[in-house]
Image (cartoon, rainbow, N blue to C red):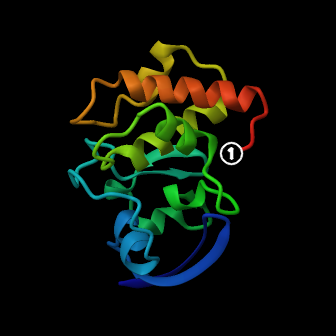
Amino acid sequence: MKRMIRLKVNGKIREDVIDDATLLIDYLRDQKGLTGTKQGCDGGECGACTVLVNGRAVPSCVTLAARCEGAEVETIEGQAQAGRLSALQRAFHENLGTQCGFCTPGMIMAAEALLRRDPDPDDATIRAAIAGNICRCTGYVKIVESVRAAAAAMAEGAEA
C-alpha cells in the first residue's frame, strides 16, 4: 500500500507518497537524492547508513520511512551550513579521520548524536557511540581523535 508521509529532512518539510515497505535509506537516496547516506550491509550492522531521527543515530537501512512520519531526519548533507563544513566534518578532514570515506558519513552522524548529548566525551564514550559503525580502513584512532577535536572546537565556540 502507499501512503503520504510528512517529515522534516535537513530542516525542510517534505511530503511524499511512499510505499509502506520503503526503507528510510531508499527514500533518502532515491526520492530525495541524498546519496551521502551510504548503503553497506542492508542489515543495520555496519553503520554506513546512519542518520539522525529526532536527534538519535539510527541505521536507515532497517528503518521504515513510514515510521519517520512527523520526525526530523538529518543526513550528512544537512551538516554543512552556508557552504561551511560542520565542526565534525572539518575535524575529520583536518585530523585524517577518513581514509576511503565510505564509513565517514555514518561515523559523523553517530558522533553528532553523541556530541549533542555529551559535548565533552572521553575516548571510551566516543568509542561506545561509534561502536555500531564499521571502518575497514583505520584502527579508529584518527576517528576518535577527530571527534575529540570537534568537541574541543565546539567548546571553544569555533565556527563550523
Q: Residue at x 44, y 47 (%)?
A: 58
Which one is in front, 54 or 74? 74
Q: Secondary structure at mark 1?
A: loop
Q: Residue at x 60, y 46 (%)?
A: 55
Compared to residue 144, the image places residue 87 above or below, namely below
Q: Residue at x 39, y 67 (%)?
A: 35
Q: Quadrant of the N terminus?
A: bottom left
Counting from the top left corner in percent of width and height, residue 49 is at: 36, 53
Counting from the top left corner in percent of width and height, residue 77 is at: 53, 61
Q: Residue at x 67, y 65 (%)?
A: 11
Residue 64, picture quadrant: bottom left
Could you tell me the amino acid type at mark 1? Ala
Counting from the top left corner in percent of width and height, residue 86 is at: 62, 47
Compared to residue 1, the image places residue 76 above or below, namely above
Q: Quadrant of the C terminus?
A: top right
Q: Is residue 14 left or right of residue 141?
A: right
Counting from the top left corner in percent of width and height, residue 121 is at: 59, 19
Q: Is residue 63 left or right of residue 117?
A: left
Q: Which residue is mark 1?
A: 160
Which one is in front, 126 or 54? 126
Residue 34, picture quadrant: bottom left
Res. 160 in view: yes
